[in-house]
Image (spheres, rainbow, N blue to C red):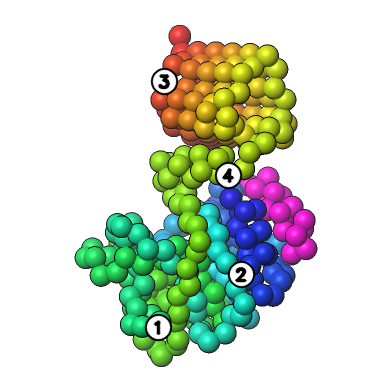
Amino acid sequence: MVARIVDTFTRVLPEPITEGVFILGPDFGEAIRDRLTQICSRRGMAASFAVQDVALGTGHAVHAAAEHLTGNGVVVFADTLFDMDPVERLTGADVIAWVKTVDDPSRFGVAVREGEHVVRLVEKPEEPISNEALIGIYYVADLGVLREVLSNMIADDRKSYRGEFEITDAFDDMLKAGMTFKTSGVTEWLDCGTIPALKETTWRLLEKEPDGVEGEVLNSTLLEPVYIGPGARVESSVVGPNVSIEADAVVSEAVLRNTIVFARARVSRSVLRESVIGQDASVSDVELVANVGDHSTLEGT
């Protein structure tokens, strides 16, 4: 997902990206940092990291990278995939928020507009005041201003009704201070913030990107669309439709449909449908629908 996000911005922004700053939870190890560094280095970018020790909201997360909040840049949350038309210029506003019209905005922050200018930002409104969902992408002309607003919010312990420091509240402070906000649309928005959304997004990407077999397939039947990542192996199995098997995973003597198998997981002698198998997980001798966490083991009898 991160690689896709970086590639999208590399393609659509009017100036090159020089650095990626990744805000991680405290349990992300060196392997994740190495992968993110490789993503950046292959695209001519530097990679830096910050850690949010306690999950106290989106604003708190961005503030964890306070030392990097200088100059202009894009703040983006990595639980969504999107596409957009090329941006000819990033001028005329202090902040540009990308939005998407949705039927139910209660899961998202929303932008309230008067004409082309944003007048209010509200995080997950209890009342339907706008159907323009903030999809977690913001261009900020001066990140130093955002840093100062976030610092003041945290110093004043100004949390939302959800008990968190919200990035939308920080941007709303900037709005009230007289800064200019505009919105921009996306041509496609693929939410990955819940397990059902992640699966739906995966199926749509599989349909759009055929020829996704990079790993090894032995004595097996593939029912497209299917993705088999580099280093993955499928042996004596029936896989598909709508199956994604990520790098270095192994599937043997199994039947999989509408299922995601994350990197380095192992599935054997099992029938899975509508399932998500986490990284480094092991599943064997079962027939079921399941969401199996990273590094977990599920064995039948």
Label located before the other in sequence (1 or 4): 1
Residue 271 visible at all? yes
Q: Which of the numbered marks, if any, corresponds to residue 208?
A: 4
In percent of width and height, residue 149 lies at 45, 80
Mark earlier in primary sequence (3, 1): 1
Give the residues drawn in magenta, as a range.
29-45
Q: Secondary structure at mark 3?
A: strand
Q: Is residue 278 left or right of residue 180?
A: right
Disc 2, disc 3: CB below 8 Å? Answer: no
Residue 158 visible at all: no
Look at label 4 and name its amino acid.
Answer: Lys
Q: In terms of secondary structure, where does tag 2 sit?
A: loop
Is 114 above or below relative to 33?
Answer: below
Give the amino acid at mark 1: His
Q: Nearer the viewer, mark 3 or mark 4?
A: 4
Q: Which of these two is toward me, 180 or 61?
A: 180
> Upstream in the sequence, badge 3 or badge 4?
4
- Name which of mark 4 and mark 2 comes first in the sequence: 2
Q: CA distance from mark 3 to mark 4?
A: 28 Å
Quarter of the picture containing the C terminus is: top left
Residues at circles 3 and 1 in contact by the CB criterion of under 8 Å: no
Instruction: Kindly state the secondary structure of the residue where label 4 is placed.
Output: helix
Badges 4 and 2: C-beta atoms under 8 Å apart? no
* Mark toward the viewer: 2 or 1: 2
Q: What amino acid is found at the position of numbered circle 3 in the picture?
A: Leu
Q: Could you tell me if the residues under marks 3 and 4 are in contact, i.e. CB atoms within 8 Å?
A: no
* Residue for badge 3: 288
The residue at which mark 2 appears reads as 86
Q: Give the residue displayed 35% in from the left and 59% down from the top.
A: 102
The answer to whether 165 is drawn above or below residue 32 in the figure is below
The residue beneath circle 1 is 117
**Viewer-closest of 216 and 36:** 216
